[in-house]
Image: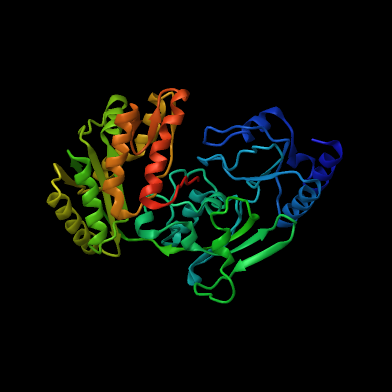
Amino acid sequence: MDERIKQELIKIVGEENYTERLIDMVSYSYDASEHSHRPFCGVWPGTAEQVSEILKLANREKIPVIPRGAGTGLSGMSVPAKGGIVLDLNHMNKILSIRIEDRLAVVQPGVVYAALENALAPYGFFFPPDPASGKVSTLGGNVATNAGGVKGAKYGTTRDYVLGLQVVLPDGRIMRTGSKAIKSVSGYDLTRLFVGSEGTLGVVTEIILKINPKPRATSTAVSTFDNLEDAGRAVTEIMHSGILPSVLEILGRETLMAINQNTDLHLPEVDAMLLVETDGYTSEETQYQMKKILDIFRKNHAQEVKEAKSEAEVTELWKARKSAYAVLARIKTHFVLEDVTVPIGKVADMLRGVHEIAKKYNLTIEDIRSWNNLEEADRIYPSDRLRLRLSGLRSSTLN
C-alpha cells in the first residue's frame, strides 16, 4: 500500500485498526469458496462516518474496497480479487435496540446471527432466516447475500425481514432507506435493492430487522424413499397441499453412506431421506400439519416414516442433517457447496437431472456436491445448465 494512502487510512481508523500483517492478509485472501487473492491492506472501522471517509479516499484514489463479515461466503464475493482494501466490519457489532412492542431490532452489520438469537430468546422472539453458518456469520453478510436457511420455505429469506438500512455509498455519502414501521410504502423500495447486492452498491452500516414471536410447539419426523423421484413428488405435493412445513430437507444415498462411514448413526442407505418439521402456536396445530404431511409421504411410496415423540428423539433425527457437511468435507479432498434454486414444482425434475449428470460424468453429486480432484471442476457445469433450463437463474447463496 502506498505510504501516503496508508497514513490517511491510519488517520481515519487509528493505527491499531489498520493492518498489513501477513497473517491478516492471508486470512482476508479467501472465504469459504475456492477463490483466493490477497488485499493491499485491511481496516476495522467503528462508525459509519469512518466507513464514509474510507470510501471517499478509495473513490478518489480508484482503489477497490471489499466489505467483509465472517468470510463464510461460498462464491468468493468477499475475496479481494483485484487487491484493494478489505473493510472488516466485525468491530461494528452492537445490538443497538430491541423493541418488542414494534417487533423490530436495530443492529450493526458485525453482529453475529447467533448473538441476535440469544438476545431475542428471553422475549420469546426470533429472527427467522437461519443460515447454516449462523453461529459465526454476521447479519451484515446475511443482508449482503440475502441469506436464507433451512426454514426458508415457510419464513422466506433475509430480504423479507429488513425494514430499513443505513448505507454508505461508494462516494462516501451516507443514506437511509426504509423505516421502523412494518408497513411503509412511500417512495422507492431501495431497501430491497440493497439486500442481496453483496457490497456492490454500498456498505451497510446499520440494519432495522423485523422479528417474529417464536413458535411454541414443533413436530419433527423423517421419511425414507427407495426412489428419488418419489421423494421429489412428495415435496411438490406437500407444498401444493396448503401446509407449509418450517423445515423440509433431503439427504441422498451418497450422503447417507458417507455419514454411516464416519459416524455411529446407522442410517438407512436409501435413495432419499426427508427431514420435516412443522411449527405453530400449539402442539395440536403442529401435529395436525404433520399428520397431513406423513399421509403424503405414504401416498408417495415412503419406505419408512418415523415421528419424534420426545426432545431426545428430535435431537437424534437432526444429527444426520447437522453432520452431513462436516462428514463430506472430511472424506472429500475438494468439493463445491452450492445452493440450487428451482421452482418447487420442478424439484423432482431437478433431482432426476442432477443424477443423470452425476452418472454421465462419474461425479458424486448430492445435497452437497463434490468431486475428488480439481481437474474435474469443469465437469460440474452441466448441472448449472440444467438449473438455468428449469428456473432461469443461477444461485449461489453465501452466508
In this view, 314 is above or below 372? below
Structure colour scheme? rainbow
Residue 199 visible in image: yes
Task: Examine the image and state in which quarter residue 166 appears.
Answer: bottom right
Asked whether 21 or 105 is in front, the reply is 21
Residue at x-position 58% and y-position 71%:
188
Q: Is residue 274 left or right of residue 138?
A: left
What is the x, y in percent for residue 77? 58, 43
What is the x, y in percent for residue 81? 64, 37
Quarter occupied by the N terminus: top right
What is the x, y in percent for residue 272? 23, 39
In this view, 199 is above or below 319? below
Query: Number of marks in the image?
Result: 0
Asked whether 24 or 225 is in front, the reply is 225
In this view, 10 is above or below 94? above
Residue at x-position 47% and y-position 24%:
374
Q: Is residue 294 left or right of residue 363?
A: left
Asked whether 387 or 181 is in front, the reply is 387
Residue at x-position 60% and y-position 32%:
36
Q: Is residue 63 left or right of residue 256?
A: right
